[in-house]
Each structure stands twice: as C-alpha cells, then as structure tokens.
Image: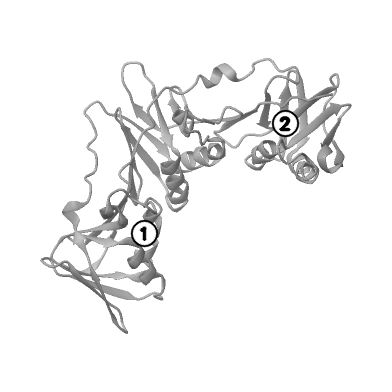
Amino acid sequence: MKFTVSSTELLSHLQAISRVINSKNSLQILDNFLLSLEGNTLTMTASDVETTLITSMEVDDVEGSGTVAVANKLLLDTLREFSEQPLTFQIDDSTLAMVITSSNGTYNFIGQSGDMYPQLPELEEDVQSMVVSVPVLLSGISKTFFCMADDELRPVMNGIYFDVAEDLTLVATDAHKLVRFKSEYISTSVGEDGTISFILPKKPATMLRNILPKESGDVQIKLDTKNAHFQLGNYTMVCRQVEGRYPNYNGVIPKNNPFKVIVDRITLLNALKRVSVFSNQASNLIKLDIADNKIQISAQDIDFSISAEEHIPCQYENEPIKIGFKSTFLIEMLENIDSNDVIIELADPSRAGIILPFENEEGEEILMLLMPMLLND
C-alpha cells in the first residue's frame, strides 16, 4: 500500500495519541502505532489495552489498503525533524518493509503485522449514552482533575466520577479535598432508573484534557458495564471504567455553614504563597484567623525558628473564628477557580470548609471542600 501525507499534520495526530503508550508494555506490539489505510482515510491507533485512542485523517495518492504496526518512537523521532512537506509512505504488503520518501531522502522501517494488535472491546447490548458539549466536558475535567487521588488501596478514588441525572455532575476527591462540578448535558438515553454513573480513570481523563481543546461541537459518550466510549470530531477513545462504588459525596458536604467570608481570590492566593514558605515542610499547616473584615494568615516552623503572618481585607462580620488548612491544598483550589472573589463557608474549626466562586461561569456550578487541620492553640 502507498499514500502521501503532510509531515506536520501526521505528526500532530500521532503526538496526540502517543501519550496513551506506556514506557514499558506487557505486550511488545503495544510499543507501536497501528496504521490502517481504507480508501483515502488513514486511521491511527495507540493503546495500552485499558485505554485506546484512535484518530484519522485524509491522505493523497493512495494505492491499495491494509494495516501495519510501526514503532512509535522511531516514527515520531523521524517526523519531528521534518519541516512542513509531503511525505510518501510505501509499505510492502508481504514483507511489511516500509519506505518513507521525502524531497531529499528515503527512510527505511520494518513494520509488524497489524493482526497482532489488540482488538477494540465491543460494547455490550445494554448501552447507555449521553451527549455533552466539548466546552462543558473540558471545563468539568479541568476543574476536577487536580482532586483525584493516587491511592492503590482505594482505586475508585483514582478517577473522576460522572453522575448524570437531572444535570451533569463531575466529582473528584482524595478524602482530604473534594470538587463537585455541575453543568448541563445535551441529551441522554438511560435505563429504567433514569441515571448514568461511571468512574473515568486518571489516564483517560488526562488524554481528554489534552485533546478536547483542539475539538469543537459535541462529545457522544457510550457506556456498558465495563467500558466507556468517547466519540469526538477527530478522535475516538475507548477506556476501561474503574470498577467499584464511589463514596456518597453529597453526604460529606456540610449543609449549614453560619460563617461566610468573601475575599479577593488573587489577594488571598498571593498571601498564602508568601506565608506558606514559613510553614512546617511536613504538615504545610497555615492558620486563618478571621475577624472584623480581616483575615490574619500565619504559619511557623518551630524546628527552624521561622514564622510569618500577613493581614488581608475581607467581608466578614460574624464572631471570630480560627481554622487551619494544608496550604498546598488551599492554594491548589484557589488556582482552579476563575472568579475574582471567592466565598469561604465555615462552621467550626473541626468541620470541612467550603470554597465557592462568588460568580460561577455561565451554566456551571462549582463547589470545593477542604478538610481542616488541627490547631494546637
């Protein structure tokens, strides 16, 4: 088989799917891209068995059809060194010898049989499906991504939980912090209970976060009991769902928080970054002392005899309250909110604090929860 393709366009597609490939694979064939030519459409596949990413593009001067597996590193390293130009690929169907011809030279590869590449899992008959717009899915994954756990003992925490009923809810938590993102979906076809729920693992979530900015329109998501199938404009992703029951996230969100603080997000964020330098490196404890429209932020490390404190203005007229948080978590949350001002809702120093944007993006609702740390004083 033979085809001609733009070097930079081919590189762009292959780089996007190459992130699926592990540095060490149990099957040697998974170190390869699968190239499949049908008509004038070249389809490229990368997989680690649990996650498979597929993309396709139009090519010119086509002769024949077929499939071949090509070493991903060799092909990518070669393509990176070309300026924009047409490249001609010629593959011998019997020996799988492959020649790339550029304007200045030829490059010889040996491919492997495409028949050895793992087959895509077929979706079962009892499929649930939903359609979500690209901007909503990208926003939901981006704003919950940082809260996923990395816990071998509780694999259900190592992903983003999709909970679809009257609205689309995405949740991520590591038991110390939690983010709940709510928005709208376009349509669903669901079972008798009228809901859809599944856990998207961290790696496929990373893939989607990388490729969604290049997409527009809608994403169709199909689900059976084991796999999730994402159909985008230029990409198809199939991944294994995380098995298990996700914790009852609504049960841990405190409902009545009498103390509400409104503060400028950037002012608070910058003050936290400065003061947290002086916190204990093991605990990262930072103390917020809130009273009379003012937050006193303080930290100390007794081992090195260093401490810092800073005052910033806020809107708060209730009785004084002191609470401790892990500074790295609080900074991370504030960095993932877009609003100029944030609302911090508190009940007492031993209960979780709620962080909300003062103004949500249109069609979105974000809630962040952070567990406090014990203060000694």
Quadrant of the image containing the N terminus: bottom left
Q: Quadrant of residue 241?
A: top left
- Estimate the x, y position of residue 180 in percent, counting from the top left: 55, 29
Q: Could you tell whether 326 is left or right of 78 in the image? A: right
| Residue ID at (16%, 66%) | 96
Colour mapping: one colour
Front residue of this view, candidates 113 and 270: 113
Residue at the extreme right: 292
Residue at the extreme front: 303
Q: Which residue is mark 2?
A: 325
| Residue ID at (84%, 20%) | 318
**Label 1 – label 2 distance at C-alpha:** 43 Å
Residue at the extreme left: 94
Front residue of this view, candidates 201 and 38: 201
**The residue under label 1 is which amino acid type?**
His
- Estimate the x, y position of residue 90 in percent, counting from the top left: 20, 72
Secondary structure beneath dot 1 equals helix
| Residue ID at (41%, 74%) | 81
Q: Could you tell whether 346 is left or right of 210 in the image? A: right
**The residue under label 2 is which amino acid type?**
Phe
Examine the rendered structure and indicate whether residue 221 appears above or below residue 107: above
- Estimate the x, y position of residue 205 in percent, counting from the top left: 44, 41
Front residue of this view, candidates 335 and 289: 289
Asked whether disc 1 touches disc 2, contact meaning CB atoms under 8 Å apart, the reply is no
User: How many residues crowd around disc 1 within 10 Å: few (fewer than 14), some, or many (20 or more)?
Assistant: some
Mark closer to the observer (1, 2): 2
Q: Which residue is mark 1?
A: 13
Quadrant of the image containing the C terminus: top right
- Estimate the x, y position of residue 102 in percent, counting from the top left: 30, 79
| Residue ID at (53%, 22%) | 249
Examine the rendered structure and indicate whether residue 206 appears above or below residue 293: below
